[in-house]
Image (spheres, grey):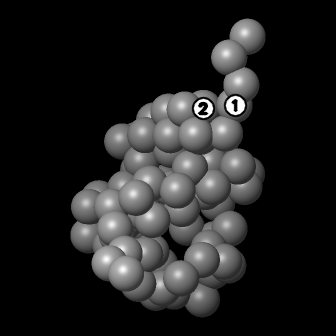
Amino acid sequence: MEIDDEKIDDVVLALLWLTLHDERRAWKGFDWDVLARLHRKGLIDDPANSSKSVVLSDEGLQRSEELFRSLFTRPT
């Protein structure tokens, strides 16, 4: 089985939107490799710090909400 890292990254980014607090902070309880990839893409700040959360960039915040809505909501 070949894992699609892009799909994993999208789902984690969507779930980061679910845990947002303080406008753009999200809990970083996800796989470190995924968080590192999101950081390299410029979607979150560096996850390698003592904080229990990461800060989403403007692009990351917008993309995370779009992904959350497309993946986890029902049409109205």
- Left or right placement of residue 48 versus residue 40 in this view: right
Q: Residue at x 37, y 75 (%)?
A: 3
Above-or-below relation of 42 to 63:
below
Residue 51, quarter of the rendered image: bottom right
Q: x%, y% of residue 23?
A: 65, 43
Please give the residue where the numbered disc 2 appears in the rendered image.
69
Residue 39, quarter of the rendered image: bottom left
Graded by Cα atoms within 10 Å as few (under 14), some (14 to 19) or many (20 or more), the crowding at tag 1 reads few
Q: Amino acid at mark 1?
A: Thr
- Left or right placement of residue 20 versus residue 54 in this view: right
Q: Are marks 1 and 2 in contact (CB under 8 Å)?
A: yes
- Left or right placement of residue 45 versus residue 74 in this view: left
Label annotation for residue 25? none
Please give the residue where the numbered disc 1 appears in the rendered image.
73
Q: x%, y% of residue 55?
A: 52, 60
Q: Quadrant of the C terminus?
A: top right
Q: Mark 1 to mark 2: distance in Å?
A: 5 Å
Q: x%, y% of residue 16?
A: 61, 57
